[in-house]
Image (spheres, rainbow, N blue to C red):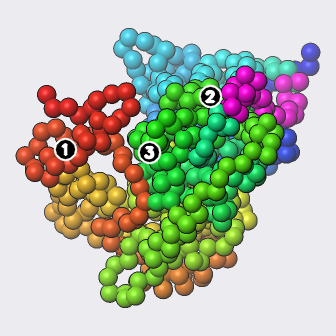
């Protein structure tokens, strides 16, 4: 057997550099790295040696550079991914939030945090977390509940099995998610005689599981028995490449469809059978169909509480649920009739079995009325005296979006407003709402642009999320990655402030002016973003915003447009009940009234009676 002598870190990075997919791309496109004492000597030296074949990018924060990797993987429909490395201690734990985000969203990321000394010579080493009862525990054990596969590389030969196992997870459509290979820092530098065959280029294939024949027959029979079916499109439809098949399936059998946050953009908004979004951030027309559907067909969705209106939206008597999902865990949720398999293969099989079977037309007038309502909400204000609403800002961006535009966001007001109001072209929407992680936005926009250089990427972010994590704006400027940031400044956490008031609470600790302060906050976002190298302008009105959006096109780096908005209004349209528990006891009459309304809704939850006073 021919061998080659390498350090464990050199061997890991060399192996990563020759792992490709069916389309000829490296699966791990490159490595985001912030170096510290736990990875600079071993992993840093290895990456430098491969810098021409495996790119290394420097981030400004471990969490946000991982967010960029996640956005890259999501935009690539899980066909490509990135690795992220940090030192031990705070560098590693900074990435735990990002790992949780990737886990919830079923997205592949390879986390390679440095770890303690396997040999325990300098024990405890700088930044080492010590468990008084378990000497094998380190800070990296925090990754265990938020990754799909965890391994600790404490011997150089461990990578011979750990790396293929990691890739098996990241390329598996059912088990896909983040992986953590905690890499002991002394092991990184330790040499080993590796089999030369280990570094032979390998092509990874993405399997398409066929459905079980009995489940398929049951699914077809269930659809045939329905009178008013409705399709709920989830992110799995996009990841399986089923978008066109789904659209054709809906057309052939005349079934209306709605889309979750993850599924939005699978089918373009102009499709007549497309009725927008369901649930808490649902469209009026979509929720009307959802409430009367006698069969709900989920395609690649996990039926999260926003989608189901906290399990109260799909409320027609005798309603049935059919869930098409590549993982049995998700397919069986909510007592659904499960059809486990690849979404595209399942839809093709169902359609073939249904033949020419078609359903009656949905009420297209509902869709037309909804669009008229949205047009009114998002139209430019007749006067520029009052602050614009978020809906009016979205309207300005919509009117200036191109067919290749991708609008993105993550938390706060924008996800709900965009879900209900934005008219997405196919592939033109990117939302991180599985984990709803504030601070994902700017790093995520950068990751989207790295995956789709031809796209016009527009990042919608509020001042609250911007303040959470903005440092990768400097990275984007440094690397010359262009995208547009529309920063809406409503002076605080406007979305949660509205929720606080809706549940009877007093405005408190959300907007800056309702928070404890000695000196009133005055944050100059224009100066701040400019200091990191972005081109920045302030728009004083909706017409100015529209003009600046046009000017931002063709920029060589990130452009930030700051506009003040009114924190008070929500979208003013759509929506369904959301289960947010209201205190049973309060001195505030508003809270008591909100509790009474909550008990009415909660008592309707299936299989339980909640909110009863004791």
Label drawn at residue 560? none
Earlier along the polypeptide chain: callout 1 or callout 3? 3
Residue 46 position by quadrant: top right
Asked if 402 appears above or below 182 in the picture, the reply is below
Asked if 300 appears above or below 466 in the picture, the reply is above
- Disc 2: CA contacts within 10 A as few (<14), some (14-19) or many (>=20): many
Helix, strand or loop under label 2: strand
- The residue labelled by disc 1 is 596
Whole-percent x and y of residue 464?
A: 37, 59
Left/right placement of residue 152 relative to residue 196 reads left
At 72% from the left and 48% from the top, the residue drawn is: 358
- The residue labelled by disc 3 is 313
In magenta, the rendered stretch is 197-221
- The residue labelled by disc 2 is 338
Q: Quadrant of the N terminus?
A: top right
Instruction: For the residues labelled 1 and 3, say whether their Cβ atoms are less than 8 Å apart.
Output: no
Q: Is residue 516 a member of the stretch shown in magenta?
A: no
C-alpha gap between disc 1 and disc 2: 37 Å
Earlier along the polypeptide chain: callout 2 or callout 3? 3
At 32% from the left and 82% from the top, the residue drawn is: 386
């Amino acid at each position: 057997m021919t061998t080659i002598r390498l350090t464990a870190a050199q061997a890991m990075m060399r192996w990563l550099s020759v792992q490709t997919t069916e389309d000829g791309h490296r699966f791990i496109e490159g490595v985001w790295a912030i170096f510290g004492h736990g990875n600079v000597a071993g992993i840093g030296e290895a990456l430098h040696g491969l810098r021409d074949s495996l790119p290394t990018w420097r981030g400004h924060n471990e969490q946000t550079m991982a967010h960029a990797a996640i956005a890259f993987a999501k935009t690539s429909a899980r066909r490509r991914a990135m690795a992220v490395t940090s030192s031990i201690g705070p560098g590693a734990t900074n990435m735990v939030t990002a790992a949780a985000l990737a886990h919830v969203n079923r997205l592949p990321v390879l986390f390679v945090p440095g770890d303690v000394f396997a040999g325990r010579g300098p024990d405890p080493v700088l930044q080492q977390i010590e468990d008084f009862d378990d000497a094998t525990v380190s800070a990296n054990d925090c990754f265990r509940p938020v990754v799909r596969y965890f391994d600790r590389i404490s011997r150089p030969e461990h990578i011979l099995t750990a790396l293929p196992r990691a890739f098996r997870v990241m390329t598996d459509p059912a088990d896909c998610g983040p992986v953590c290979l905690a890499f002991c820092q002394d092991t990184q530098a330790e040499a080993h005689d590796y089999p030369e065959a280990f570094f032979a280029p390998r092509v990874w294939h993405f399997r398409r599981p066929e459905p079980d024949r009995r489940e398929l027959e049951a699914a077809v029979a269930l659809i045939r028995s329905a009178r008013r079916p409705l399709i709920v499109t989830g992110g799995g439809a996009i990841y399986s490449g089923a978008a066109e098949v789904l659209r054709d399936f809906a057309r052939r059998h005349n079934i209306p469809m709605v889309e979750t946050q993850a599924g939005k953009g699978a089918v373009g908004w102009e499709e007549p059978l497309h009725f927008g979004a369901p649930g808490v951030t649902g469209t009026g027309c979509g929720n009307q169909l959802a409430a009367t559907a006698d069969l709900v067909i989920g395609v690649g969705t996990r039926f999260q509480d926003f989608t189901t209106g906290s399990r109260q939206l799909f409320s027609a008597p005798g309603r049935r649920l059919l869930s098409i999902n590549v993982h049995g865990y998700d397919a069986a949720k909510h007592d659904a009739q499960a059809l486990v398999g690849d979404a595209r293969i399942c839809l093709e099989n169902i359609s073939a079995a249904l033949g020419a079977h078609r359903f009656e037309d949905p009420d297209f007038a509902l869709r037309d009325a909804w669009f008229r309502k949205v047009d009114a909400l998002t139209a430019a204000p007749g006067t520029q005296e009052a602050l614009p609403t978020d809906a009016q800002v979205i309207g300005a961006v919509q009117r200036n979006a191109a067919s290749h535009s991708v609008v993105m966001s993550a938390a706060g007001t924008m996800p709900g407003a965009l879900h209900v109001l934005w008219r997405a072209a196919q592939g033109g929407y990117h939302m991180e709402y599985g984990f709803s992680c504030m601070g994902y936005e700017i790093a995520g926009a950068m990751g989207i642009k790295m995956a789709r250089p031809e796209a016009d990427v527009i990042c919608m972010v509020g001042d609250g999320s911007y303040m959470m994590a903005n440092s990768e704006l400097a990275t984007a400027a440094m690397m010359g990655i262009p995208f547009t940031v529309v920063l809406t400044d409503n002076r605080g956490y406007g979305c949660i402030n509205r929720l606080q008031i809706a549940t009877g609470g007093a405005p408190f600790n959300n907007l800056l002016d309702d928070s404890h302060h000695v000196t009133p906050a005055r944050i100059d976002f224009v100066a701040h973003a400019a200091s990191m190298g972005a081109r920045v302008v302030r728009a004083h009105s909706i017409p100015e915003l529209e003009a600046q959006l046009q000017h931002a096109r063709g920029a060589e780096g990130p452009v930030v447009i700051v506009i003040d908005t009114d924190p008070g209004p929500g979208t003013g349209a759509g929506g369904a009940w959301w289960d947010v528990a209201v205190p049973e006891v309060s001195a505030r009459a508003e809270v008591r009234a909100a509790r009474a309304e909550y008990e009415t809704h909660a008592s309707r939850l299936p299989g339980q009676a909640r909110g009863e006073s004791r």
